[in-house]
Image: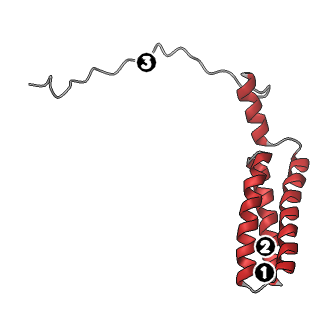
Amino acid sequence: MDIALVLLSTSALIGATASLRLKVFVLVPLAVLIVLVSAAVLHMHGFGPGNGVVIIVACLVVNQAAYVLIQIGLGTSASEQSFDEVTDGKPAPARDQAVDDDHGDQQSPPPRLLLSQKK
């Protein structure tokens, strides 16, 4: 029964971590990964099909619940904000835009001679 708790807590941790950096579309590949790894681990520890399926479904529910709870707790994720900035072409209101595009004080590097030109 300890292995079931480890699988459930790992699934919750994966869901919470994914919600901090990744979009919701990542839940599909994560679900496939969780199913495959959980099934292999449960089979190695002698769980039958009935108990194994229940534990795997619980792992998927816990994973997605952790993702949703973290998203609700944060309001909007950091990845959504940066994606909006890129698509809108407008910086966020709190960002400073004091970067100067004039690089007139920089000198160009001296030209390099190719091996065929050196004699």
Circle 1/circle 2 CB separation < 8 Å = yes
Residue 46 picture location, percent across and down: 76, 86
Q: Classify the position of the C terminus by image quarter.
A: top left
- Most foreground residue, 72 or 59: 59
Residue contact at pointers 3 and 2, CB within 8 angstroms? no
Q: Position of residue 9 (x, y in %)?
A: 81, 70
Q: Is residue 36 above or below residue 112?
A: below
Near-viewer residue (82 or 64): 64
Q: Which residue does the numbered mark 2 point to in the structure image?
A: 7
> What amino acid type should be assigned to the residue bearing mark 2?
Leu
Indicate the secondary structure of the residue bearing disc 2: helix
Q: Secondary structure at mark 3?
A: loop
Q: Tell me the residue that label 1 is attached to.
A: 3
Q: Which mark is residue 106?
A: 3
The quarter of the rendered structure image containing the N terminus is bottom right
Which one is nearer the viewer's eye here, 65 or 46? 46
Q: Mark 3: which amino acid?
A: Gln
Instruction: State which tag comes first along the sequence, 3 or 2.
Output: 2
